Image (cartoon, grey):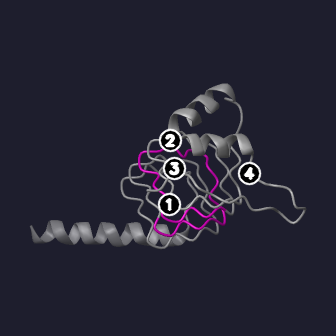
């Protein structure tokens, strides 16, 4: 995974969508992020419309973070708490969500080709695109076939 390096995109009005305080915390790393979350406990981090591809978010508290329209391709969210996070219209190609908590997260319109959701905690309340459900069914079918051969 690479160190945080990103570009901020703008909406049609020309103003930056992501809040700089959260972007600065990403650059500084997990400890700075945790401290910022402590200082602003009621804030939902706005990281929308940024390029955060291949960032290592392993074990981060990203609850209720807004990643709408963000390029997170190749990002690693293993073990992260993503409860209530918004991934709508994101590029999540090749992203890793192994053992992440994604309860209540929304992936509407997200591109999730080759994303790894193995072991992710996703109760029925989570909005998941049909391709993730299909991937889980395929993985379950493979697992059952392997058990049947053993």
Disc 3 from disc 4: Cα separation: 21 Å
On screen, 99 above or below 87? above
Would you say 115 lies left or right of 40 here?
left
Element assignment for label 2 = loop
Q: What kind of secondary structure does the magenta stretch mostly adopt?
A: loop
Image location (x, y in percent) of residue 102: 51, 49
Element assignment for label 4 = loop
Q: Label 3: which residue?
A: 102
Element assignment for label 3 = loop
Q: Label 2: which residue?
A: 60
Q: Label 1: which residue?
A: 54
Quadrant of residue 41 in the image?
Answer: top right
The first of marks 3 and 1 along the sequence is: 1
Q: Label 4: which residue?
A: 18
Q: Within 10 angstroms of label 3, few (less than 14), some, or many (20 or more) residues?
A: many
Q: Image point 39% across, 54% down: which residue?
A: 98
Q: Image point 61% across, 64% down: which residue?
A: 71
Image location (x, y in percent) of residue 79: 42, 45
Q: Which residues are magenta?
A: 70-94
Q: Image point 59% across, 58% down: which residue?
A: 52
């Amino acid at each position: 995974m690479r160190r945080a390096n990103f570009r901020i995109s703008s909406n049609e009005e020309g103003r930056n969508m992501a809040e700089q305080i959260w972007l600065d915390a990403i650059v500084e790393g997990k400890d700075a992020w945790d401290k910022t979350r402590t200082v602003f406990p009621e804030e939902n981090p706005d990281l929308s419309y940024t390029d955060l591809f291949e960032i290592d978010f392993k074990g981060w508290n990203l609850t209720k973070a807004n990643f709408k329209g963000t390029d997170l391709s190749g990002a690693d969210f293993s073990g992260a708490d993503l409860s209530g996070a918004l991934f709508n219209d994101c590029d999540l190609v090749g992203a890793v969500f192994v053992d992440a908590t994604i309860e209540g997260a929304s992936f509407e319109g997200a591109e999730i080709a080759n994303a790894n959701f193995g072991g992710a905690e996703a109760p029925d309340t989570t909005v998941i695109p049909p391709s993730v459900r299909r991937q889980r069914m395929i993985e379950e079918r493979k697992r059952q076939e392997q058990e049947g051969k053993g």
